[in-house]
Amino acid sequence: MVDVAVVGAGQTAFGQHPGAMKDMWSEAVRACVESVDGDVSLSHVEELFLGSTAFGGGQLGNTAAYLGEHAGMAGVPARRIENACASSGFALRDGWAAIASGRADLVVVGGLETMNDLTPERKRYWLGVSGDTEWERLAGLTFPGTYAMMARRHFHEHGSSHDDLVHISVKNHDHAVDNEHAQLRKAVTFEKAASGSMIADPLTLYDCCPTSDGAACLLLASAEVARSLTDTPVWMRGSGAASDHLALHDRPSLTSLHATKKAAAQAYAAANIAPSQIDVAEVHDCFTIAELLATEDLGFVEAGGGGAFASEGRGRRNEGATTVNGSGGLKAKGHPLGATGAGQVVEVFKQLRGQAGVRQVDDAEVALTHNVGGSGATCAVHIFGRGLA
Amino acid sequence: MTTTRTFNGGALCDVAGGLLLQSRFRVQGKAVFAPDADFTTLTVDLLEAWCSLGGEPCIAGLPDAVAADVVRASLPHLVEDAASPWHLHVLDHAVAIVEGDAPLLPALSGDDVIVMEPAMHEGLEDAWREECSSSNVSQGAYVSDRTHRLGMTARLALAAQVGPTWPPRGADHNGQVLAEGGNLVPFGSVYSWTRLVPAGAPSEFALRAPLLGGLTSMVVELDDGPRGVFLHADGHESVVDIGRSVRLVVRRLYAQDGVLRYGRKALS
């Protein structure tokens, strides 16, 4: 297999974007190109993999061709990849595979979502379309509801509590203060986060990610091309992906995401590293309970230990073995569904090149991204390094 | 006063030559249905009570006031035979199964009554009317009428495949169609649950959730093994906890494209 590196990464700010879909994507592409150390032309791009749920249906068909054309990639074979919130995590996997297989040397992977330009009524219809519509949604469940069920079951089985989730919320808000791309650059106190208005019992407003616009773009290259473009490529050392039952009620456990465990096992094996070697982890915390489960499923702590991991602040920047969501995570950086996975890689790209500024994690050598679709029906895990091994 | 007992949230009593089930909900003393009930759900409840007490699942026919397809899908063993002596009668927010003429409707004692505020009742009636209008169409997540109808026996009669597997699958690991596996009993226990504030409820419930103060949804582990997710039946105060026993009853779920859709909801 051909070694693959990320040689460029850029994104828009996440939050309320003033532009149209094509403006947002073009801005992310420009930021990506500007981040490349050497000279690169988009005319050399061989494939475009774009993750998006096409939220709102504004450009539901041929989304990638439409956006490619608007950002200097007319003619490049383009396709939209849809796996709910894990869309660009899976786009990354496909882009990686295109190069690793020897089929291409230079590809663009991206993600995009416009969520805040819809009327409240239309937004409400679209939120939650990625659950099991026939059996879950029409029995009253939206994603806050499904994750609330997971939280309550975790409390029941492992003795964790809502206070543990509050610690995650406070940490991620603290981290986001230093992130110029974050949507919620505002610290919150434990007391305030603990007393948020209820959304889906036991989850409150401070347990939930915001609704976001945003785009992120990555440039992937084969080893040979990467070395011609930069002296500090970020190597992709492992890729893992898995699916699980779509509906919560079909899963043997509500306190662990099988797709995460399976995808992580593949990625760790490919990279030949252990969870304890991860310095930086950008995990999918659409709800605080999702981060708690991720720390367990990714092996940063034993099953059932996620509550203590959170309350002891082990994921805080430079305070534990692994910094978890140093960007602010989905919770505070924002969660523009299809852009989230690629956005996680933008953060990792900066951290491993020592370009993260005041939020730089000390001696960051190895990083992980964890991108989940819906309530865990799909998951992509990737491992990156400053070196190849 | 006739002795009644609660069954599926309604007031059940013996009447001469049969059984009667009436709504316990009252607005200023006047009988009304539960927020998600109607003659169809009351009829299913009554026939479930009738069969559980050893009654013969054979009736002379279904009244016009009920959605026959829903009753038939809910009770797959029900036989309709014009020669049957057992007749269904529709009364004031009540249904009865008797031999012969309709019985008199017995009064409920105060303890059996669930009082509903007039504003809430009117609001819910208006919401159902608007939801049932053909202009109420989905702009996103959508279950087509065909898909809904194909799932009716699984949804209403808990029809399962071997295993038991429920809800049904298209194929097993070998690509083979799973054989039918009978009907699951409508009993189970709460595996996990949540209460969604009105703004957090799916848009299909947007009109009614604010009036109901939100929605309670739960994963129920059925006594036969499979799990499913169910709403709590509307209007009934109850404590929901992990491990608590529930009974699954047929109620209105929502309306789309001008058609009311029914399913099972949990009652603790």
Image (cartoon, rainbow, N blue to C red):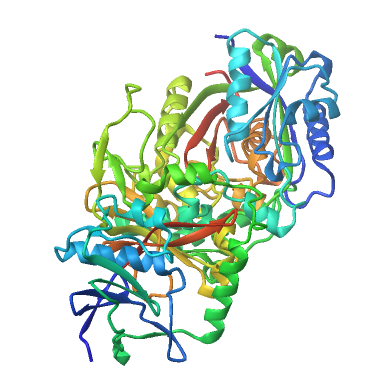
Q: Is residue B17 left or right of residue A68?
A: left
Q: Is residue B86 above or below residue A217?
A: below
Residue A72, quarter of picture: top right
Residue A197 visible to an observer of this rendering: no
> Where is the N terminus of chain A found, in terms of image quarters?
top right
Residue B171 visible to an observer of this rendering: yes
- Residue plotted at (46% across, 30% down): A242
- Residue plotted at (44% across, 36% down): A260
The residue at the far left in this view is: B54
User: How far across and down, in percent of the image, does residue A186 sit?
Assistant: 68, 60
User: How far across and down, in percent of the image, does residue B113 sit?
Assistant: 35, 86
Q: Is residue A37 left or right of residue B101?
A: right
Q: Is residue B88 left or right of residue A22?
A: left
The number of numbered discs placed on residues in the rendered structure image is: 0
Q: In this rendered view, identify the residue nearer to me: A366 or B73.
A: B73
User: How far across and down, in percent of the image, does residue A326 sit?
Assistant: 60, 46
The residue at the far front in this view is: B83
- Residue plotted at (22% across, 53% down): B223
Q: In this rendered view, identify the residue nearer to me: A148 or A179.
A: A148
Residue A311, quarter of picture: bottom left
Q: Is residue A345 above or below residue B44?
A: above
User: How far across and down, in percent of the image, does residue B138 sit?
Assistant: 63, 51
Residue B10, quarter of picture: bottom left
Q: Is residue A152 left or right of residue A337?
A: left
